[in-house]
Image: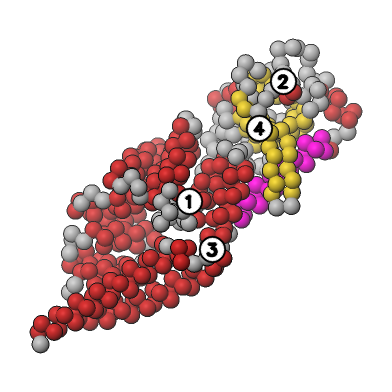
């Protein structure tokens, strides 16, 4: 009879393990068994599976009250949705108390405290798991958490730098794990926006995202991957790729309004730029001529017709600012300009304080990065020439170079749901 009780307990524990495994598989691999068109049903399906899993685990706990794995499974089930759960915290805390070597329980408890915004307790859990054994899950979580820890600007920047190293450790443990590559990509993205010191960080972020997407089982259908990569592409003014990324993210997570909101912002911004160029800033011909006359006849400057798409070395493009197109405090700052041949183009300036450039001033761009923007967004056909400026100190306004005092660091805007 005693042997039968043990067998029953083991059987119920195995059933609990399967129920929770099925729940997590449904949450993480939903689109392997469901069409993207069913995305709106995902949350309801996951919640139903969670309810069922908890019932099975609770039945197993009746026979396994002191079993750390049983309490871990209960905590894992309650922790399967994005919201903080007190039930999850209690069960997971009991699991690590019963068995301090249970790494999965430490990691889940760290996630649970993170949802509770208790960053200190969360960090202690991930480090506690790493004390038991170096593992990619704890390293990933720790890297993500480090970028959200409070502190002054210098401390936050150091946290971001350190988070890259931790994410690289996670990748090194399993180079085929897409989640680790995704976390590394986000770390490089945050590092780029924290210092703006080198575009190498941006290149490394894009490389990591490409590696992440190769993991078809874990990451190819992760909406945050597509959204964060779209943020990067938008910043690089690679609008076609950004549009695809935001549309994909929106399809995979219909409950998140951000991707479609970002897409609307892109459409509005590009439409405004297109219309300004096409309509010559709604400025009369006489006024446009008087603006062009603000430039002297020096031959040391070039017009837009002398440039080509891409970086134009040994060229200084000069025009007059017809109008300011951007909203206050927006990034980038956008200026409609006209050159001496009365060709109109937009200049997008990053990392510059507000009001450093005003309308009707002569604006010179050294070694301009020229783009021929051609894209269809929904029903809008967009076409215009644009010049991108990342370093405002390459600009001169009315013959006077901008200086370090005119600089300001661009801000990152990306999803923090899974990072």
Q: Can see residue 147?
A: no
Q: Which residue is mark 4?
A: 371
Observer-nearest of 20 and 321: 20
Residue drawn 22% across the image and 78% down it: 11
Q: Which residue is mark 2?
A: 306
Residue drawn 90% across the image and 28% down it: 286
Distance (Cα) linking label 3 and label 1: 16 Å
Predominant SS of the magenta segment: helix
Expressed as whole percent of the image width and height from the top left, the position of residue 291 reads 82, 25
Q: Which mark is residue 225?
A: 1
Along the horizontal axis of the image, is 76 left or right of 335?
Answer: left
Along the horizontal axis of the image, is 404 left or right of 181?
Answer: right
Precedes in sequence: disc 3 or disc 1: 3
Precedes in sequence: disc 2 or disc 1: 1
Q: Which mark is residue 36?
A: 3
Task: Please tell me in which quadrant of the rendered image residue 107 appears.
Answer: bottom left
Precedes in sequence: disc 2 or disc 3: 3
Crowding around mark 4 (Cα neighbors within 10 Å: few <14, some 14 to 19, many 20+) is some
Q: Which mark is residue 394?
A: none
Expressed as whole percent of the image width and height from the top left, the position of residue 87 reads 33, 72
Which region of the structure is painted magenta? 258-281
Query: Quadrant location of the N terminus?
Result: bottom left
Distance (Cα) linking label 4 and label 3: 34 Å
Expressed as whole percent of the image width and height from the top left, the position of residue 210 reads 46, 44
- Tell which tag, 3 or 1, sits nearer the viewer: 3
Disc 4 is placed on an element classified as: strand
Disc 3 is placed on an element classified as: helix
């Amino acid at each position: 009879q005693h042997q039968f009780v043990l067998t029953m307990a083991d059987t119920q524990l195995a059933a609990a393990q399967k129920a929770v495994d099925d729940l997590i598989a449904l949450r993480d691999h939903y689109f392997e068994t469901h069409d993207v068109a069913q995305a709106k049903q995902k949350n309801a399906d996951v919640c139903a599976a969670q309810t069922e899993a908890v019932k099975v685990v609770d039945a197993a706990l009746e026979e396994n009250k002191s079993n750390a794995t049983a309490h871990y499974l209960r905590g894992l089930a309650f922790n399967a949705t994005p919201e903080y759960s007190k039930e999850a915290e209690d069960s997971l805390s009991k699991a690590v108390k019963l068995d301090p070597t249970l790494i999965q329980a430490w990691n889940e408890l760290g996630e649970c405290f993170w949802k509770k915004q208790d960053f200190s307790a969360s960090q202690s859990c991930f480090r506690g798991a790493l004390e038991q054994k170096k593992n990619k899950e704890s390293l990933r979580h720790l890297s993500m958490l480090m970028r959200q820890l409070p502190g002054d600007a210098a401390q936050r920047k150091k946290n971001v730098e350190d988070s890259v190293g931790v994410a690289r450790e996670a990748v090194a443990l399993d180079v085929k794990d897409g989640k680790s590559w995704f976390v590394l990509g986000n770390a490089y993205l945050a590092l780029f926006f924290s210092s703006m010191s080198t575009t190498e960080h941006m290149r490394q972020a894009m490389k990591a995202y490409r590696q992440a997407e190769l993991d078809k089982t874990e990451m190819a259908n992760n909406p945050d991957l597509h959204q964060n990569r779209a943020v990067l592409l938008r910043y690089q003014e690679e609008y076609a790729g950004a549009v695809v990324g935001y549309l994909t993210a929106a399809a995979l997570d219909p409950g998140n309004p951000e991707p479609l909101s970002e897409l609307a912002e892109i459409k509005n911004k590009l439409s405004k730029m297109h219309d300004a160029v096409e309509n010559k800033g709604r400025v009369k011909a006489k006024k446009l001529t008087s603006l062009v006359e603000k430039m002297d006849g020096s031959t040391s400057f070039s017009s837009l017709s002398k440039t080509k798409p891409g970086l134009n070395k040994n060229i200084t493009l000069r025009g007059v600012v017809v109008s300011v197109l951007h909203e206050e405090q927006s990034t980038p700052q956008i200026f409609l300009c006209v050159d001496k041949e009365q060709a109109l183009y937009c200049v997008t300036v990053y990392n510059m304080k507000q009001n450093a450039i005003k309308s009707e001033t002569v604006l010179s761009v050294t070694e301009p990065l020229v783009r021929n923007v051609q894209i269809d967004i929904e029903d809008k056909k967009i076409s215009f020439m644009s010049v991108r400026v990342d370093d405002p100190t390459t600009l001169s306004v009315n013959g006077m170079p901008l200086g370090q005092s005119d600089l300001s660091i661009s801000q990152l805007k990306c999803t923090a749901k899974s990072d």
